[in-house]
Amino acid sequence: MTEGTAGQGRGPTLIGSVRRAMRLLATAYHLLRTLVHDGYLTHEGGLYAMGESARRLSGPADAQAARAELVDWLGRLRDDLGAAVYYALYEDGEVNVVLTAEGAGAPAVQEWAEFRRTAHAHAIGQCLLAQLDDAERRDHLARHPVERLTPFTVPDERALLRKLARMDRGGPVHEWQQYTPGTVCAAVPITAGAVPSALAISLPAGRADQLRPLAGALRQRIETTLTSLSFSVRAAPCRAPER
């Protein structure tokens, strides 16, 4: 019996199976492209991850669970780093500090000048602005012009845009008393998801020598946690419980 007749009457031949597999692959490819286009998946560096549209399908219980998980994680970060920790998003053209974790030994920065209006002067705002395209960035600055808050604040829009252009994508942003005297801050971008977001820490100026090492530790923690923690919380600002 030849190889050709052995397959007769017993389903597809080897070549037919290959063709069917190729059709399935093509279908899967177009399905993935559609899901990415519609925001249900993201595709970066050859990897697929859940997108914002898929997250919006989850119910209130899922959102509450994600929020509780994030609050707990921020509290652990605060304790491990010995610094106040902030989680912020850039949505609808504005900076939104969603969560803050502070404690007795890690006080948060007091918002004496509205954070959304002064993005140019603090690490969170600069980190979020750096994630926008040029048109979005200029639109934000047209609505919230650069102003001097302290002697250390970036002097004007041109200087700010130069600083943003030089920033390492994915690297920490450092700020030395630009927003408020006596406080230094650092922020690290979160590269998962379609909405620009960041985590930040603040320290008293007397601990300024610890800012860069702690910012590096924060970046490491973000990179090791992105695969398991959902950074999709949408809520009014609140603070993690003190410990």
Image (cartoon, grey):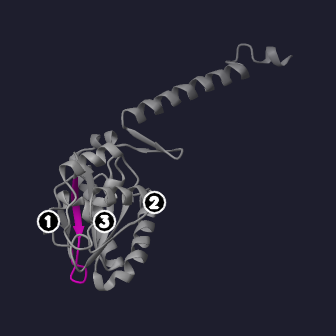
Distance from disc 1 to disc 3, alpha carbons, whole Å, reads 14 Å
In the displayed orientation, state which residue is furthest to the left. Answer: 112
Q: Is residue 179 above or below residue 40?
A: below
Quadrant showing the N terminus: top right
Q: Which mark is residue 168?
A: 2
Question: Is residue 130 something that shows in the picture?
Answer: yes
Amino acid marked by disc 2: Asp
Front residue (pair 112, 159): 159
* Rendering coords of residue 17 (x, y %): 67, 23
Which residue is pictured at 17% across the width and 57% down the height? 117
Residue that label 1 marks: 113
Quadrant showing the C terminus: bottom left
Distance from disc 2 to disc 1, alpha carbons, whole Å, reads 27 Å
Residues under numbered marks 2 and 1 in contact, where contact means CB atoms less than 8 Å apart = no
Earlier along the polypeptide chain: callout 2 or callout 1? 1
Residues under numbered marks 1 and 3 in contact, where contact means CB atoms less than 8 Å apart = no
Q: Magenta region: which residues?
A: 95-108
Q: Is residue 143 above or below residue 163?
A: above
Front residue (pair 140, 238): 140
Indicate the secondary structure of the residue bearing disc 3: helix
Indicate the secondary structure of the residue bearing disc 1: loop
Indicate the secondary structure of the residue bearing disc 2: loop
Distance from disc 3 to disc 2, alpha carbons, whole Å, reads 14 Å
Amino acid marked by disc 3: Ala
Earlier along the polypeptide chain: callout 1 or callout 3? 1
In the displayed orientation, state which residue is furthest to the right. Answer: 1
